[in-house]
Amino acid sequence: MTLAAGPVTALDLLADRPLVVLTGAGLSTDSGIPDYRGPGAPDRTPMTYQEFVSGPAARRRYWARSHLGWGRMRHAEPNAGHHALARIAPDLLITQNVDGLHERAGTPRLVALHGRIADVVCLGCRTTSTRSTLHGRLTRLNPDFAERHATAAVRPDGDAEVEAELEDIEDFVVPACEHCGGILKPDVVFFGENVPAPRVERCYAAVDALADAGGALLVAGSSLAVMSGFRFVRRAAATGTPVVIVNRGATRGDQHAACTVDAGCSEFLTELAARRQR
C-alpha cells in the first residue's frame, strides 16, 4: 500500500509519540454503519432528550425506529480501523460512537463518551439492563413489525428511517421497566443531555498529559461538529499538543490541526499500527 504525501507526513508525526485518539462515526462506516455528516450523508435530526421525555408518542416513535436499527446494528463487526486501534493501544481512546465496536475489538483504555446503545437504563429507578433483553420484549410485543420494515435505512445512532410512520408507529407497544414500571431509555447521551462529568474529566486529563509527554491527539472519522468531542481538540491545541485529523471532508477542527488527511480511517490506521510496531 502506498499513501500520498499528506498521509505520510501525518504518519511520521504519529509514529513514535504517546497518543490519545478521538473517534467518530466515520470510523464505523466500513462496518456498514452510516455516518452523520460525511460526503453524501443525508440530513438527520436525532431525537433530543427533551422530546424523548415529552410523552408516549415520542417514545413510541423512537423505540419503533430503534428496534429496527438495533436488529441490524447488533450484527455489525469491528473493521480494520477498530482492530488497528486495538493494536496501537493509545494512552486513551475517546469514542463518540455508541456502537460498542471498539470494545469488541479489544481496545484496552477507552471512554465511550456518549455511552453504548447495547445498554438500557430506567429513568425512574436507574436500573440498567441489556439491549438484547429489551429487543426480545419488543419483538414479542410487536410481532411482524421488523418484517414489515425490512428495508428501512439504518442511522448511525442505532435507529432507522420508518416510512408510513403514523400508520405503523401509533400502535407500537413500548414496555416499561420490569422493576418499577418506569420509562426505559438507551443508556446513551441524547442531544440536550450532558456527558457525565467524570468521563469528561478523564478525557481532559489524558489530553493534558500529552503536553508533558510530547504526545499527539489523533482524530479519526469525526467532523467535530459536536462540542462534546471538539472541546478536546481545542484543549490539545491550547496546550501546544499537535493534532492530526483523518476524515473524509473538512472538519470543525481543521484550523487547530498540525496535519489533516482527507481519507478513510481503515487504511490510515492500519498503516499507523504497522509503523508503530516496527
Image (tube, rainbow, N blue to C red):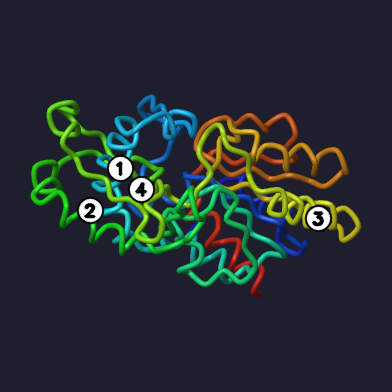
Q: Could you give the CA–CA distance between mark 1 and mark 4, rounded to whole angstroms?
A: 19 Å
Q: Quadrant of residue 231?
A: top right
Nearer the viewer's eye, disc 2 or disc 3?
2
Q: Quadrant of residue 104?
A: bottom left
Mark with earlier residue (4, 2): 4
In this figure, which residue is indicated by the disc labeled 2? 138
In this figure, which residue is indicated by the disc labeled 4? 33
> Element under label 3?
helix
- Image disc number at residue 205: 3
x 58%, y 31%: residue: 225
Q: Could you give the CA–CA distance between mark 1 and mark 2, rounded to whole angstroms?
A: 9 Å
**Is 198 on the left-hand or right-hand side of 128?**
right
- Image disc number at residue 63: 1
Instruction: Say what amino acid the circle numbered 1 marks.
Output: Trp
- The answer to whether the residues at label 1 and label 2 have Cβ atoms under 8 Å apart is yes
Residue 124 image position (x, y, % from top left): 48, 49
